[in-house]
Amino acid sequence: MKLFFSPASPYVRKVMVSAHEKGVAERIELLDCAANPVRRDKTIVASNPSGKVPTLLLGDGRVLFDSRVICAYVDAQAETPRLMPEGGDARFAVLTLEALADSILDAAVLARYETAVRPKELLWDAWFNGQMEKIDSGLDALGENWMALLSGPVNTGAIAAGCALGYLDFRFPDKDWRTGREALANWFAGFSERDSMRRTMPHG
Ligand code: BEZ
């Protein structure tokens, strides 16, 4: 398996944390690329029209994207630990937790692009603030409704939440998301100690 990769991407981190948890990380070759929302990397676009990372190339020519699909594929590469329950209510709970965490990530990445990529004269404060409000609503929901699933056996939803919180610390170090969300903050402190999280610290 070959993965178009950025060491800063929280979506790539979801995939790599999953791969470490499943014990298959060494089977993934990381392909350097220059994913950018404006200057799109044509090498990725040739395989994935969105030009985004993560994009996974399989040995038989198939291409998988986005992070949710690749995480499901990685989960299927080894029996245990099962990161996505096979069926029933448990499956839909983990899928919803993953979607909630991804919605925090989506807003955080858009807010990051707004300050890091968009020319200053084109900044739109109301739009930026709207993304930050989405992040806060999502964090509140994680702390209020999802602590039990986060605290149970490792699963794809918890991995996505860990990567979302890690991305906030990485790109928004001044954002005090912990105050008033102590249970979530404590959970993240413990989850960050996992080998899979330590090996995938974002940089770049
Ligand atoms: C970042 O540098 O923050 C980033 C890189 C790739 C995807 C998303 C975010």
Image (spheres, rainbow, N blue to C red):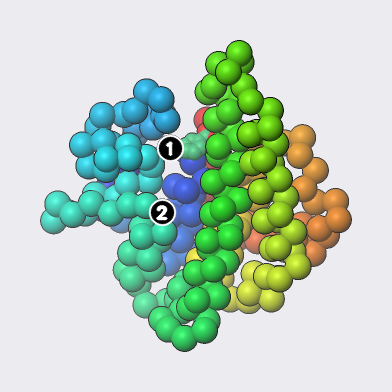
Give the left or right position of residue 187, taking residue 43 as reference: right
Determine whether 117 is above or below 24 in the image: above
As drawn, the residue found furthest toward the right would be: 180
Which mark lies nearer to you, 1 or 2?
Answer: 2
Would the CB of label 1 be found within 8 Å of ligand 1?
yes
Q: Which label was assigned to residue 67? A: 2
Q: Which label was assigned to residue 6? A: 1
As drawn, the residue found furthest toward the left would be: 60
- Which of pointers 1 and 2 lies earlier in the amino acid sequence? 1
Label 1: element kind: loop
Q: Is residue 63 visible?
A: yes
The amino acid beneath tag 2 is Ser
Label 2: element kind: helix
Q: Pointers 1 and 2 in contact (CB under 8 A)?
A: no
The amino acid beneath tag 1 is Ser
Residue 199 or residue 66, whichever sits in front: 66
Q: Position of residue 70 (x, y in %)?
A: 36, 58
Pointer 2: residues within 10 angstroms few (<14), some, or many (20+)?
A: many
Determine whether 120 is above or below 51 in the image: above
Query: Label 1, label 2: how many angstroms apart (C-alpha)?
Result: 13 Å
Q: Position of residue 47 (x, y in %)?
A: 22, 42
Pointer 1: residues within 10 angstroms few (<14), some, or many (20+)?
A: many
Q: Position of residue 84 (x, y in %)?
A: 45, 73
Q: Position of residue 197 (x, y in %)?
A: 57, 54
Q: Quadrant of residue 174?
A: top right
Q: Residue at x 27, y 40 (%)?
A: 49
